[in-house]
Image: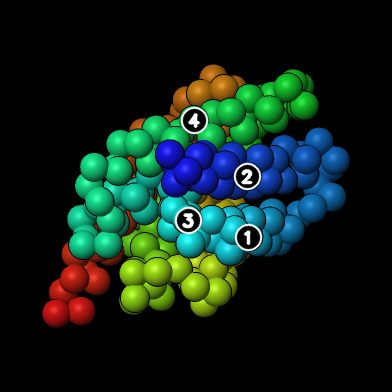
Amino acid sequence: MKRYVAEALGTYALIFCGPGAVVINDLTNGSMGHVGIAITFGLIVMAMIFSFGSLSGAHINPAVTIGFALTDRFKKSDLMPYIIAQLAGAILAAATLKFLFPSHPNLGATLPQGSEMQSFVLEIILTFFLMLVILFVSQNKETSPYTAIAVGGTVLLEAMFAGPICGASMNPARSIGPALVSGELTSLWLYIAAPIIGAVLATFTWKLLRE
């Protein structure tokens, strides 16, 4: 149960700070800027891995959990409890943002700026490399300070260059929480499907390279 609570808390923090930064940026006429938002995402992921990595692995991402479930590093019986905890944390965080900023229309939901196919492919590629980094920096099945720095840095990097086009979600929970609470369900399917596809492809690639 402690692991599930850790996943819920970690995902809550991610959604509260990440999309929260988007909301605050919108309401303060761009005071944070795109770079500030990307840094916020990278730093909160890094902080949650430092905090909860040794307890739950700090997946805070259903796509990452699904990827790990295809390896020998994660008990498959924990798959659904982890995902439920992550979604609960994400929805609760989005509800908190709705309470604090009721005038914002979408609570920082991820929306494609070009075509859906463009964002779909981008999200697959972004999640593929994120998951690959996660698997390779946790070689000994345990998280470490290097894991936090590498994963947080990857999130920051990918949000920095791809965020303006696809939102750089790489995380179904990150997109589901704000979308459900705000009612902005446009293109939500791609932010669920693409990260899962990317994470699964990365897991099989990792297995191939490891063998």
Relative to 143, say whether 66 is above or below. above
Is residue 45 at all visible to an observer of this figure?
A: no
Give the distance between the C-alpha atoms of the residues marked 1 and 3, in whole angstroms. 14 Å
Mark 2 vs mark 3, CA separation in Å: 16 Å
Quadrant of the rendered structure where residue 106 is?
top right
**Residue at image location 44% in from the left, 35% down from the top:** 85
* Residue on which the image places disc 2: 13
Mark 2 Cα shell of 10 Å, populated few (<14), some (14-19), many (≥20): many
Q: Which residue is mark 3?
A: 55
User: How dense is the environment of label 4, judged by Cα within 10 Å: few (below 14), some, or many (20 and up)?
Assistant: some
Residue 66 is situated, as x and y percent measured from the top left of the image, at: 29, 49
Tell me the residue at 27%/62% (across/down). 73
- The disc placed on residue 159 is none
Point out the tag, 2 or 4, that comes first from the N-terminus: 2
Question: Which residue position is annotated with label 1?
Answer: 47
Asked if labels 1 and 2 touch by Cβ distance under 8 angstroms, the answer is: yes
Q: Quadrant of residue 134?
A: bottom left
Q: Looking at the rendering, in which quadrant would you find the C terminus?
A: bottom left
Q: Amino acid at mark 1?
A: Ala
Residue flagged by tag 3: what amino acid is it? Answer: Leu
Say which element carries label 2: helix
In the rendered image, the residue lying farthest to the front is 1
